[in-house]
Amino acid sequence: MKLARATTAARLRRLSALPVMVLLAILAIGLGIASPHALSAQNLINILNQQASLILVTVGQTIVVLTAGLDLSVGSVVSLTTAIASHDIPFAVPLAVLAALAVGLVNATGILKFGIHPILMTLSTMTAVQGLALLIRPIPGGTVPDWMRSYAGAELFGLPLPVILTALAVLIAGMAISHSRFGLHLMATGASPQSALLGGVNTGRIILVAYLLSSLFACLGGLNLAARLASGDPLVGAPFGIDSIAATALGGTQLSGGLGGVAGPAAGVLFLALLGNGLNLLNISTYYQMIIKGALLILAVSAHRRNQPGL
Amino acid sequence: MLLEVTDITMSFGPVQALRGVSLALRPGSVHAVLGENGAGKSTLMKIISGVFPPSSGEIRVGGAPVSWHQAEQARAAGVSTIFQEFILLPNLSVAENLFLGREPRNRLGLIDRPRMREESRRILARVGLDLNPDVLTGSLRVAEQQMVEIAKGVMRDARIFVFDEPTAALGDREAAQLFALIRQLRTEGKGVLYISHRLPELFDLCDEVTVLKDGQYAGHFLMKDTGPEELVTTMVGRRLDQLYPPRPAPATGAPLLELRAVKVEGLAGPVNLSVGRNEIVGLAGLEGQGQIEITRAIYEGHTLEAGEILFDGKAFDHSGPTGGIAAGIGLIPEDRKADGLFLPLSVARNISAGLLPGLGLGRSAPQPKAEIEAQVRRLRIRLRDTGQTIGELSGGNQQKALLARWLVRGVRLLICEEPTRGVDIGAKSEIYAILRELADRGVPVLVTSRELPELIGLCDRIVVVRDGATVAEIPGAEATEERIMAAAIRGGQR
Amino acid sequence: MMLKKILLTGTMLAGFAIGPAFADAPELNPALSPVAGAPMVDLPASTKQSFVLGFSNISVVNTWRVQMVEELKNEAALHPEISQLIISDAGGDVNRQVADIESLIARGVDAILVSPGSEVALNGALEKAHAAGIPTIIFSSNATPEHYTVKLLADDAQFGRDGAKFLAEALGGKGNVIALRGISGNSIDNDRFRGVTEVFADYPDIRIIDQGFGDWAYDKGKQVCESLLIAHPDVQGIWSSGGAMTQACAEVLEENGLPMIPMTGEANNGFLRTWKEKGLQSVAPVSPTWFGQQGVIAALRVLEGAPIARDNLVNPPPILGDQIDGFYRADLGDAYWVGSPLPDEKLKELYGK
């Protein structure tokens, strides 16, 4: 049988990040014309530095979304991490990492062992972990170890260290998703857990690792944020859950699982940030900004739906 | 023996799906497993492919006993299953699917794509598939996906291939390709287990057959020594010609329903049709020639563009289903689950839905318990009690419940689209008997069906539809598949 | 110290002599006064003729903050020497506020006004502004960098003290009081309540027998007040951390046929209306919205070299029962915060009925 067909899997995956990249480029050019300051190196570095935490959280979120899951608890994990890391106790940072991993373990257990829907499961842990963060640090404050403070201010080749490390994390996660066995199994699990299981994928382990990684990346985002703010804040992570999901969807990762990567979602974070930054530079009021953001999000996500054949 | 299954029992809670089933598969043979829906075929196949372990019994592969609780173990032992619902992942490439779970890796621990691609190409060629291994699996046709699935088995050196109703979604040409590949597997000395209830293809393809009935072993035959009648009798427990109730003498008298030069929206027309007071009339034709549009025009009316529909000699309201219902016409729709049943509701509520007068606003549905239960007994609907959720019933019992809905209402004519779709042979014959009894009592039935033998066996007259027009009318006693097909394709004389 | 003052005066005089005289510089509201011992700002006057001001706001989450920002914009528009005012709103996200401040620094504004969302989180960014030589004006809530130019803050404890003193006098120094508090753990609420306990420490016969958190909201306040009054129908006074909760409490008393006991309110239009209509015994401590306006004035004084202290506190006197008519605006809605410097047409646009 001779068959000719254009769509290769690799091409489809590359295409998934295309719309957001195009949007990002259009936005950047538009802003550059509207305000000469918008594309200044300093402003771009500022945006990257500000968004490093959300990008890290979004990388974890993307991994879970690839399995057709969703992790609403990442925001609370960010808050919890800043709350723990800002306490002057020995091993505060390792403790924060362990706490985050425990949240991931609870999420995966609920979803795998008790068959709870990911939204409900992570909604529950989101609420509980938020409470825990408030318990540990009822009001913002505290201080982080000196090394974290110097990390936040450090620069390498004229770029802030947090930006460099975040870029590295995105790169490694991107490689893992597109070129490792784990990444392939993530996408298999997301498309159809039943088929993946029959095909020889240990789907339970994949889902467990996905939620652990999601919590871990949320923790890294939280540590980065605590370092930047030099303090803890029990509510600081609250917007991260929804924001990371919005960026993931914007970045071409299908919420139904099985298709996507981290480059698109990372670009999605930058798109939303550049949008806010640009609207600020143009002195557009916050109320209009919210309306514009919501409308653009619908527009961008609907742009994805058309170029995904066969799925 | 390649595979020996001995005395397998399988229980799901209180339900016993398999009891003492045995089967032996020879190398270089295609072995059919035949049975009605619910006879236990799929359960047996899932046990053989390791999806779940049996409650008791023994499985031997190449003489050695095995104990599997994961599909991967069966696969490692050389059993490759092509499931009814595909297990290929549509979002992965063909090569990724082939190597899923055993991807070759390079020194960096990453997937070695060049090697994967090269090996995939080689394996695909072995099953006669010239396909770019990087192509997205979801963009392949169903037949191609099945062949990729087979290639996956070939690649893993499987000795036993299990096919679960593989032709269900295939066209004739694709099915022929698949059969060629299965024959090739047989020549290579593999063993093939082949589940299907399409009798003709079994005689075409298989060497022997094991028949299951109600979860039990019912017989084993060599294909060359048996025929369709014997297999159906074994499978159903009754003879094929007893499936349909006897036809009474041709009816006379004024028709109850008459369609005169009717033109339905979107179809060429015209439709001329009459249904007598004690008749079962069938609408036959190739798929999508307007059969359903005609029945809906009678029932709902609003697609009627020209001509007249008379019921008992009188015109009636054609603005929507309420007109037809008020006149006394009932409809059992083609898609039972979507258009007929309220799946989450109880059997009693589903039946009493026929009693809702008008819009039923502000009133709760009346539930004359005695009447509902009388219908349940009369139609022999098998259920725990009438409070049971209708979604839990088998297709045949659901269909009977729909019949009961119209009977409690006192319908005067029944339209049955695909009366036995997704219904077991046992329940089929019961439904045929009910329809015949209705006609005898003066409630005629208008039937559409994709299965010509069903129309031939059941109907008093068969009206052939082509391109939205009635083109031929054949008395049931004289009808053959050839005659109907000839009229359906070429048209014919009236 | 003396020497420094003389030097300072010298600089000021020099500034007067050469150019845009600081005599033209706007004056701060007299309700703002330097903290005891606060040094004067000793930056040289800017040589520029016009200024770009940047304002980093944490959020516009409630009407108090909306009015504060409007007053800031209004004031900036009154001064032709302000060529541009850049406002960034962090939407409640301190991380974004850090980036907003960094962005203002990158744009090279002449002064940065900050209404901070955190006491500590912005310190790094504010230090960067200092290092870049940009004056920083911190107002309405505190941030604690080592280096800053001017702070304009309210003493929230004073809000509590004003109400507590009124209650102590109205009750004749004796009685049981319930406290309606704001959001649990909120620093403003904590400070206000600290003021209350300070005052009552001098009145051993006044006891706070119960308290509840009404989140400063009317509906939540009503629930909390209802349950507190059911538990303690015989209380003699109510202290409230916010006007909307007092409004709610007055209605609970009325609905249940209980006597109108003394209760403290807050200087917003809705509470003044209830006070007037129901003839409450009350007092309205003021939490001024005009920080934004004063922030602009402070920035101009710094840039024009006019004298201004580094640390300033606002202590407006509370509104008393016989002063209601001087503040209450029947033509404006309940959400209006009284004593606004905004022009009438702007107020009508924001709060008109």
Image (tube, coloured by chain):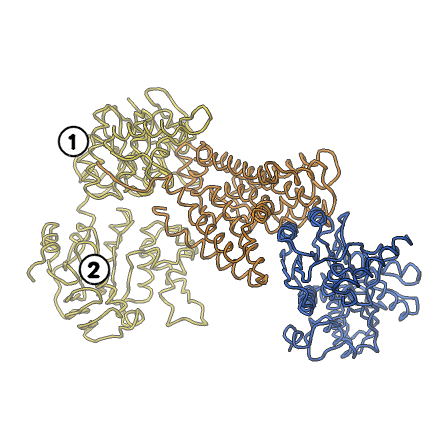
Chain colours: A orange, B yellow, C blue
Kindly give the residue lying farthest to the top in the view shown: B63
Identify the image quadrant of residue A53: top right
Answer yes or no: is residue A175 visible. yes
Question: In the image shown, does C235 or B39 lie closer to the viewer?
Answer: C235
Q: Amino acid at mark 2?
A: Gln
Element at label 2: helix
Callout 1 and callout 2 share a chain: yes
Q: Give whichever of discs 1 and 2 has the lower sequence position.
A: 1
Dot 2 corresponds to which residue? B291
Q: Position of residue C306 (x, y in %)?
A: 79, 61
> Could you tell me which residue is drawn at 38 percent across and 63 percent down?
B352
Element at label 1: helix
> Could you tell me which residue is drawn at 28 percent across and 66 percent down?
B411
Dot 1 corresponds to which residue? B225
Q: Position of residue C79 (x, y in %)?
A: 69, 68
Answer yes or no: is residue C155 visible. no
